Image (tube, rainbow, N blue to C red):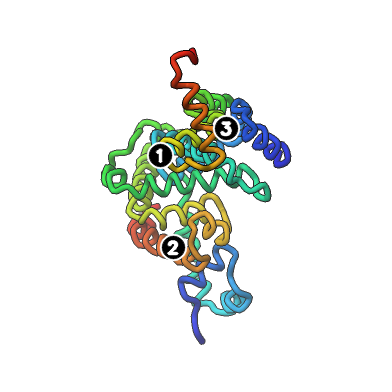
Amino acid sequence: MKHLSEEEQLDIYYEDGSEESKAHLKACRECSAEYAKFKRSLDAIKPEAVPTRGADYGEQVWQRLQSRLIPYEKMAAQCCWRRHLLGGGIGSTSGRVSSRRLRVMASPNSG
Amino acid sequence: MQGNDHSIVRAVLAGDKEAYGALVRAHSAAVFRVAFRIAGNEADAEEIVQEAFLRAYQRLDKFEQRSTFGTWVYRIAVNCALNRVGQPGIEAEYRYGEESDPEAKTVQVAAQDADPERVLLGREVSAAQELAMQRLTATEKCAFVLRHLEERSMGEIAEVLGVAPNAAKQAVFRAVQKLRRELAPLRGNA
């Protein structure tokens, strides 16, 4: 009789085992004893307690984050500018739009 | 929440940056938990949380509405954590018995059992487990944390890690083999 491999034991442990493996485990005393040891060793690996975070944790994360975010409309405009400055936007509609914006911004009368 | 999340995403993409705060508030705790379990320390976990939400924001226009925002940012966080623990400097920083916050650990174990001998044993087991986890490769560690501690399916793990399901399963298996081998001497005592 072919005994269960360690990989098959792992499948059973994580409830992914085949019916054949499970039936063998029930019937084979040697594999049952082996599996009991295997299970004990994995059960012993417990998650380290995750440090607690208060109810306002999400707010704290947001406060730290928000200054780094550019609103989406502005972000799209910046992409156009970048494309234009790198020469990629010339000839395209967005390139024409951004180059016009660039001229306006660069003009001494633009404020 | 899922429908609500989707409408928030639409608002953010329409230029309402402040709306993103609601998503951050709702999902920060879950992202921190997985980040801490993979990184193994609070400082790195906090940076992973920031990086994950920043990356998610920057790629929000690629977010597919068929998945939930929570699942999506979780996956991004796992990838950020994977990159971070994969950096050689971070793994090399760890030394046996030099926990980042040994006092916190003492308190944690002491609260469970006041018997000094058991407290000492608990600390020894905990330190050995942490060391064994640090010796895994970044992929093995991630795969193991997701399977064993976060109870994710192999399919989910494969998707998060961007590998075939069989490769994810092999990563978990290798991690289990290594951990069992490393922790075997303690099993007689624990």
Please state the horizontal and vertical placement of residue B91, each as a whole percent of the image: 30, 47
Mark 1, residue position: A86
Looking at the rendered structure, the secondary structure element under dot 1 is loop
Q: Are marks 1 and 3 in contact (CB under 8 Å)?
A: no
Same chain, labels 2 and 1 = no
- Above or below for B169 versus B91: below
* Above or below, A53 relative to A48: above
Q: Quick one: which residue is furthest to the bottom in this view?
A: A1
User: Which chain is home to disc 2?
Assistant: B
Residue B114 can be seen, yes or no: no
Identify which residue is drawn at 60% across, 25% down.
B18
Is there one chain holding both mark 3 and mark 2?
no
Q: Nearer the viewer, residue B102 or B27?
A: B27
Type of amino acid under label 3: Tyr
Residue type pointed to by label 2? Ala
* Helix, strand or loop under label 3: helix
Q: x and y percent of residue B111 in the render? A: 47, 33
Could you tell me residue B58's position as x and y percent? 52, 38
Q: Residue at x 39, y 48 (%)?
A: B83
- Could you tell whether B186 is left or right of A40 in the image? left
Please identify the quarter of the rendering in which residue B184 is found: bottom left
Query: Which mark, by number, is residue A72?
Result: 3
Q: Which amino acid type is shown beneath numbered disc 1?
A: Leu
Chain letter of the residue carrying label 3: A
Label 2 with label 1: CB-CB less than 8 Å? no
Indicate the secondary structure of the residue bearing disc 2: helix
Q: Is residue A69 left or right of residue B10?
A: left
Chain identifier of the residue bearing label 1 in the image: A
B109 shown above or below A46: above
| Residue underneath mark 2 | B171
